[in-house]
Image: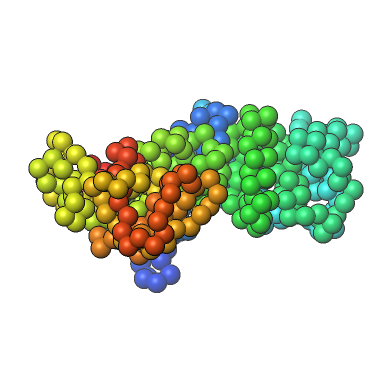
Amino acid sequence: MKVVLENLTKRFASRQEKGKDVIAVNRFNFEIPDGQLVGLLGPSGCGKSTTLNLISGLEVPTEGRIFFGDRDVTDLPPEERGVGLVFQNYALYPHLTVEENIIFPLQNLKGKQRMTKDAMHKKALEVAKLVQIDQLMERKPKELSGGQQQRVAIARALVKIPNVLLLDEPLSNLDARLRLQTREELRRIQRETGVTTIFVTHDQEEAMSISDLIIVMKEGVIHQIGKPQEVYDDPVNLFVAQFLGTPAINVLEGDIRDGKLYIGSEAVLDMPGKRNGPVWVGIRPEGFLLDENGPFTCGMDRVEVMGRDVSVVCTHPNMAGRNLRAIIPSENRMDAGAKTVRFSLKPYKVHVFDRESEARL
């Protein structure tokens, strides 16, 4: 089921300044396609969880409308929207078994939706098999690992066959290896069920790896919407470029002069048709080519061997941060004792932004 958000806005009264409002979500417009997994991505406080709460009905919008398909659900309570919710904390009932936790939402169905006990047990077993916990049905939550508990929470959200599945930082409490395994499982489950899913996270790698589309937010405002690779390759502004990518993009002060991009005194790329003036230059770590005759010179700090790749940590007086990091294939032979290192740059991995507005040029 598609989800349509029209001018969705949420204001809260400021705790610091009386009479003023904090805008958590600001005129959010987007249509989430039927059956897709969409990642809401942004730093803490950007409004992504508030957006999820508005869609679920846990928060009431100050302005705007919410549609599930052609149905306006803006004024409906959460229980009438047909949503499944999974939170960062698993919120399982400790005194109930896995099966009882999964069945719990079915016991509250009324009228025509009411189910027999046999039907509830059958449905619970179906979703338990889907999330691969059908062998754990008699256990209590305390007898489960964190990943298993999260699967129970997902099964409980899916058992009513929701119109929309809403996931709010569902992997944050898991260790790194388990997070990787569980996010792969989330993607598998979403594909098998075909349920429209909205996934909130501050982890850009997590969002990019499993989402059909990502929405990058900051301070309640959408900055960019698109397929993960497209947003990574073509960021609309410096914020999006810096937020996506591990290691982070290298940002340097630069200038465009007479059709060339300068970093310091070195002309590193041709920039035909671009107006002269100061710019921010963003270079992805994988955008460097080791080249003894290259146009871009950096001070050598250290070389970190990572197996298939080598991370060359450098210094440059125009860097906005402390160090510049270049990722190059391990077959390149580096002189770790050299004082300087020279690179040529891959043009499609270099992004140029207006110095004041930070919009991409």
Q: Percent from the top left, x then y, of residue 338?
A: 35, 60
Q: Percent from the top left, x then y, of residue 175?
A: 66, 56
Looking at the rendering, which quadrant does residue 83 occupy?
A: top right
* The N terminus lies in quadrant: top right
Evaluate whether residue 68 shows in this view.
no
Eyeballing the image, is 258 above or below 298? above
Residue at 63%, 37% (x, y): give it. Answer: 187
* The C terminus lies in quadrant: top left
Q: Nearer the viewer, residue 343 or 262?
A: 343
Residue 293 in the figure: left or right of residue 174: left
Number of numbered labels in the structure image: 0
Q: Nearer the viewer, residue 332 or 137?
A: 332
Residue at 35%, 53% (x, y): give it. Answer: 250
**Color scheme of the displayed model:** rainbow
Residue 239 in the figure: left or right of residue 354: right
Eyeballing the image, is 197 above or below 174? above
Q: Nearer the viewer, residue 308 or 233?
A: 308
Seen as rendered, the residue at the extreme left is: 258
Eyeballing the image, is 74 above or below 278? above
Q: Percent from the top left, x then y, of residue 110?
A: 76, 38
Q: Percent from the top left, x then y, of residue 239?
A: 35, 51
Residue 128 in the figure: left or right of residue 168: right
Residue at 41%, 41% (x, y): give it. Answer: 232
Evaluate whether residue 228 shows in this view.
yes
Residue at 48%, 57% (x, y): give it. Answer: 304
